[in-house]
Image: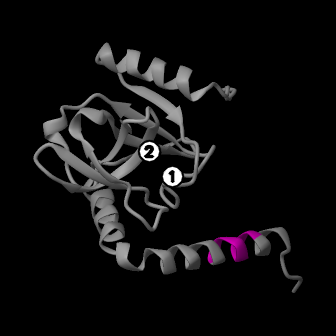
Amino acid sequence: MKTEKQWISSEALFSAIEELLSENRKAVFTVTGMSMWPFLCHGRDQVIVEQCDPSSLKKGDIILFQTSSGKYLLHRIIKLRENSFETAGDGNCFRDGWFDRSCLRARVIILIRDGKDIDCRSPRWKVIFQIWMALFPIRKTLLHLLITFSKRKKHENQHPRSV
């Protein structure tokens, strides 16, 4: 049975997520925006988040946090200090800045793509994420190449050559 997607406001979504997390439950939602591409894609991928202790954060974690302006972001931790963290979207070529650990709302534990779960805590994915973070200085070039390759592949799938 295929589940129908329903789009709701960010305010309603994050209010519901906060309620689930306060009950020590997990929450799942569809990603919006492209700041985490190529690992998470707008409207296609989902994430499962769980409440976590701010002191347990690790470099490389994908977290849901709320900025001082009230905006929710789902980005990766790239640096940690005793009471704060710095994040960046995987598809961004800039850092978001530093945030107090009290801004943390949840940590992503599972990515869901095409009905398949990807455990963010698995050694394989941790290595992939570490490599991607290490490539930050050349990310702009890499993202350009990925976009070009993706467009070319899409074009070839829409217009196969006759043999």
Are dots 1 and 2 in contact, CB under 8 Å? yes
Q: For label 2, count other residues whose C-alpha is less than 10 Å away and answer few (under 14), some (14-19) or many (20+).
A: many
Q: Which SS class for mark 1?
A: loop
Residue at figure coordinates x 57%, y 77% from the top left: 144
Q: Position of residue 102 (x, y in %)?
A: 24, 33
Given residues 27 and 162, the one toward you in this image is: 27
Query: Which callout, 1 or 2, points at the residue further toward the start of the chain?
Result: 1
Residue under label 1: 40
Whether residue 65 is situated above or below residue 7 in the rendered picture: below
Q: Residue at x 28, y 18 (%)?
A: 24
Q: Extreme right residue here?
A: 162
Q: Which residues are magenta?
A: 149-154
Residue 157 on the magenta span: no
In the picture of the structure, the residue carrying the numbered disc 2 is 111
Q: Position of residue 115 (x, y in %)?
A: 55, 41
Percent of width and height locating residue 146: 57, 74
Q: Amino acid at mark 1?
A: Leu
Q: Outermost residue toward the front?
A: 69
Task: Name the magenta segment's main secondary structure.
Answer: helix
How crowded is the residue under tag 1: few (<14 C-alpha within 10 Å), some, or many (20+)? many
What residue do we see at 37% from left, 33% from top?
Answer: 49
Image depth: mark 1 or mark 2 in front: 1
